[in-house]
Amino acid sequence: MESYTESFEKIVSEQLARLEKIKASPEYTDFAKLDKIVVGIINGDGIGPYIMAHAVKVLNTLLGEEISSGRVELRNIEGLTLENRVAKLKTLPDDVLAQIKQCNVLLKGPTTTPDKSAGLPNLESANVALRRELDLFANVRPVSIPEKGINWIFYRENTEGEYVLGSRGVDVNDEMSIDFKVITDAGTKRIAKAAFEYAKNNGNLNVSIITKANIMKKTDGKFKDICYEVAKGYPQIKTDDWYVDIAAANLVNPQMQKNFNVFVLPNLYGDIITDEAAQIQGGVGTAGSANIGGSYAMFEAVHGSAPRMIADGLTDYANPSSILKAASMLLRHIGFSEKAQRLESALAKARTAANVTGFADGDTAEKFMAVLLENL
Ligand code: IPM
Ligand code: MG
């Protein structure tokens, strides 16, 4: 067996190679300029296929003309299921990844991460693997509550931090284990640039950098420094920084909520804080998520596959809002802003008319969808 010092050496050289790859990675693709856009449809596990069926219906309705003319293709990607991944003992079976790479953008339902506690092999999360394989470095998550003056957008770094080696920690011996967190200059620069560009293009919104640089001095320290470095290119934008603990508190502080606009944050804090923000908006079932890279983009719900809802027979009550919000972000990303706007207005009306809570005392997704489709 490999010693832990050998494992560590290997990890360091792999991470240095990853850094070089980031430096050589392509600029954004402008999908609006492509002759043909292939949208891969990945249903996912658990409640995934149920909520995705609603989203596909909406895309077919909104993109009817473009689909008929061949400008847009909705392509089903089979095989990214828990069963197939467990059978192949591979998070992203080769043939499935090859199909995915033939698409330009993806709409993806939540996928279940198998683990030991369920008696399954301990495979890596498909989300995390896809984000890495397709180099989807910016996880963009908007939260908006107009009546409270809340208009937030989170730029979560999506490929490094605690996640990049999350499945590759080292058991030093039976009594001690070590995990790793990796932050690079190039990896931070590109997420910071994406956040500041968004802030600039939307009327010079405030940018808040979130870290725990008082404790994680090397990695978060670097993240904070690089973000401030990038901020120098945007002198008109008000930039500040917060530690993640007080940021979490301020998000629920009515006196502070309105002051925040754009957040830029490393991967794990972004994961946690965006669930909190989604909850403030009305629950994780209401928030969409975009994973953007230079060559590909993937749009998904913020929440997981909700195996408990399946076990409790609650699939009819699964809220499709989050995946529909993701679908509207996809439409905007590929150049159909007006259709995205139509979907967002219909979503707002459906939310008012039907209260889908994920529980049997709430409304069903069917009731919600009837209002939405009527208003599309
Ligand atoms: C998210 C999810 C994922 C993450 C899980 C499913 C791996 O919580 O997209 O926020 O941790 O990033
Ligand atoms: Mg999360």
Image: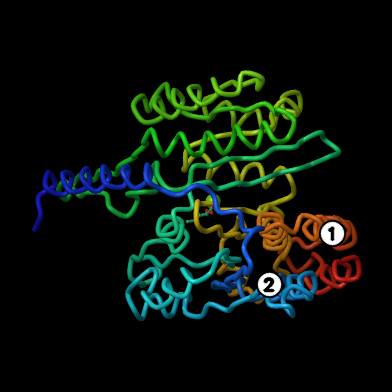
The percent coordinates of residue 173 (x first, y second) are 14, 48
The quarter of the displayed image where residue 105 is located: bottom right
* 367, above or below 27, in the image: below
Percent from the top left, x then y, of residue 85? 40, 75
* Mark 1 secondary-structure assignment: helix
Q: Residues within 10 Å of mark 2 (few under 14, many from 20)?
A: some
Q: Nearer the viewer, residue 371 or 40?
A: 40
Q: Is residue 39 above or below residue 168?
A: below
Q: Are marks 1 and 2 in contact (CB under 8 Å)?
A: no
The Cα–Cα distance between marks 1 and 2, rounded to whole angstroms, is: 20 Å
Label 1 sits on residue: 342
Give coordinates of residue 20: x percent, y percent. 31, 43
**Colouring method of the image:** rainbow
Q: Label 2 amino acid?
A: Arg
Residue 180 falls in image quadrant: top left
Point out the image quarter for the C terminus. bottom right
**Residue 38 location (% of width, % of height):** 59, 71
Q: Is residue 314 visible?
A: no
Label 1 near ligand 1 (CB < 8 Å): no
Residue 71: mark: 2
- Give the residue at x 70% y 51%: 283
Quick check: 334 left or right of 229? Answer: right
Nearer the observer: mark 1 or 2; the answer is 2
| Amino acid marked by disc 1 | Arg
Q: Tell me which numbered mark, 1 or 2, is placed earlier along the sequence.
A: 2
Q: Can residue 254 be seen from the camera position used here? A: yes
Q: Secondary structure at mark 2?
A: loop
Q: Residue at x 38, y 33 (%)?
A: 185
Q: Determine whether, in the image, residue 287 is placed left or right of residue 155.
A: right
Q: Quadrant of the N terminus?
A: bottom left
